[in-house]
Image (cartoon, rainbow, N blue to C red):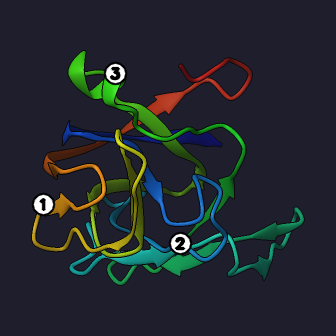
Amino acid sequence: MVNFVLYISADLENLTNFSPRFGVDDPSFTYFFKLKCENCGEVTEKETCVSLNEEVPGAKRGTINLIQKCKFCKREGNITMIPGRGYPLTISLSETEKPAPLMTFDCRGVKPLDFAFNGGWKADSIKGTRFVDIDLTGGEFAEYDEEGKCPVMISNLRAEFKVVDPSKRIY
């Protein structure tokens, strides 16, 4: 069992609390990333999607969020998401270039790689306006906060999976 934490960072301009639309533990938010087979090293061609609201029964333990067979060696790997350990990216973290832990993944037989930012994000303007359903497929978001009378922007998106000890705090 290896736990990977997805850390995200970005340059936030006049925005804070950047996270999935309904918070870091949003059951409807879908994570897209490639998987590497721990047996043969094969990397999936396309992104795999996993979310908290999709569960399948596990053979030896409760439910898991994804079971996937390697197309090359046919070995099965699985992922169980562990909510409750992440938090949004704030403007203060962004300014100090520190990432925010978003979600923890218990991975068996697979390793997550190359997280893809898609739709379903939110962020709050420092002036109080909430922006929802932000689509980051194009790599950035730019708008004007009419109420706060300031430009807002999310750019320079970065994501990294790090191995963590499951018994310790992640940040």
At horizontal 34% and vertical 23% (from top left) the residue drawn is 93
Identity, as a three-letter code, of the amino acid under mark 3: Ser
Callout 1 crowding tier (Cα within 10 Å): few <14, some 14–19, many ≥20: some
Left or right? Give the position of 94 relative to 23: left
> Where residue 169 sits: x, y (%)?
65, 19
Element assignment for label 2: loop
Q: Quadrant of residue 64?
A: bottom right
Taking the spot 42% from the left edge, 57% from the top edge, the residue there is 39
Give the distance between the C-alpha atoms of the residues marked 2 and 3, in whole angstroms.
24 Å
Q: Which mark is residue 140?
A: 1
Q: Residue at x 50, y 66 (%)?
A: 21
Q: Mark 2 points at which residue?
A: 29
Counting from the top left corner in percent of width and height, residue 27 is at 67, 70
Disc 1 residue type (three-letter): Glu
Q: Are marks 2 and 1 in contact (CB under 8 Å)?
A: no
Q: In this view, does 69 lie to the left or right of 40?
A: right
Tag 2 near tag 3, CB within 8 Å: no
Amino acid on which the number 2 mark rests in the picture? Phe
Residue 92 circle label = 3
Q: Left or right: 134 with respect to 170? A: left
Q: Which residue is drawn at 59% across and 56% down?
A: 23
Q: Could you tell which of marks 2 and 1 lies nearer the N-terminus?
A: 2
In space, the residues marked 2 and 1 are separated at their CA atoms by 19 Å
Q: Is residue 43 visible?
A: yes
Looking at the rendered image, the quarter that the N terminus falls into is top right
Disc with the residue nearer the chain's start (2 vs 3)? 2
Q: From the viewer's perspective, is the residue at label 2 or at label 3 nearer? A: 3
Q: How crowded is mark 2: few (under 14 residues within 10 Å), some or many (20 or more)?
A: many
In the image, 44 versus 138, the foreground residue is 138
